[in-house]
Amino acid sequence: MSHHATQLDRAFHALSDPTRRAVVSRLVEGEAPVSILAEPFDMTLPSFAQHIRVLEECGLIVSEKRGRSRWCRLVEEHFEQAADWMQAERRRWNGRMDRLEVYLDKAERDAE
């Protein structure tokens, strides 16, 4: 399996969790400390930190220590890889649907 596929698998796995998707949505607005990111969730900080770790391990976010806080930010390039994959799949399925439409139109005309 290629590195790109493995990274893509890890990114989609990370984004399969609603908590992690919410963190990503918040980080779209700009970097933030973990304590602020954790506020909306009813979980302990160590439990929340596991979500941050998953996002970091797949490369969707990076974090750095600043004073007593850990700040997180998005790594846009890794989202672009996922978006590129989804766009390629969309093109492929659109092509299939176009061919199906042509086939069904022909079948309908032949049946008349």
Image (cartoon, grey):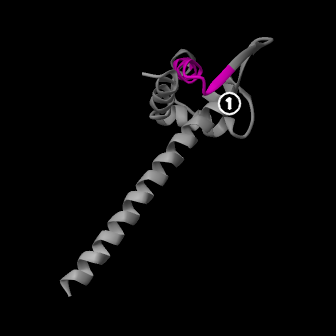
User: Which segment is the magenta one?
Assistant: 49-62
94 or 63: nearer the viewer:
94
Q: Main secondary structure of the magenta part?
A: helix
91 or 54: nearer the viewer:
91
From this view, report whether residue 100 is shown above or below residue 4: below
Residue type at mark 1 is Leu
Q: Is residue 32 left or right of residue 79?
A: right
Q: In this view, does 101 lie to the left or right of 84?
A: left
Write the residue at 46% across / 33% down.
17
Q: Where is residue 96 in the image (x, y as percent from the top left)?
A: 38, 58
Location of the C terminus by quadrant is bottom left
Q: Where is residue 37 in the image (x, y as percent from the top left)?
A: 64, 29
Write the residue at 51% across / 25% down.
7
From this view, report whether residue 53 is shown above or below residue 20: above
Q: On the image, numbered disc 1 is attached to which residue?
A: 74
Q: How crowded is mark 1: few (under 14 residues within 10 Å), some or many (20 or more)?
A: many
From this view, report whether residue 104 is shown above or below residue 76: below
Q: Is residue 69 magenta?
A: no
Write the residue at 67% across / 29% down.
75
The secondary element bearing badge 1 is classed as: strand
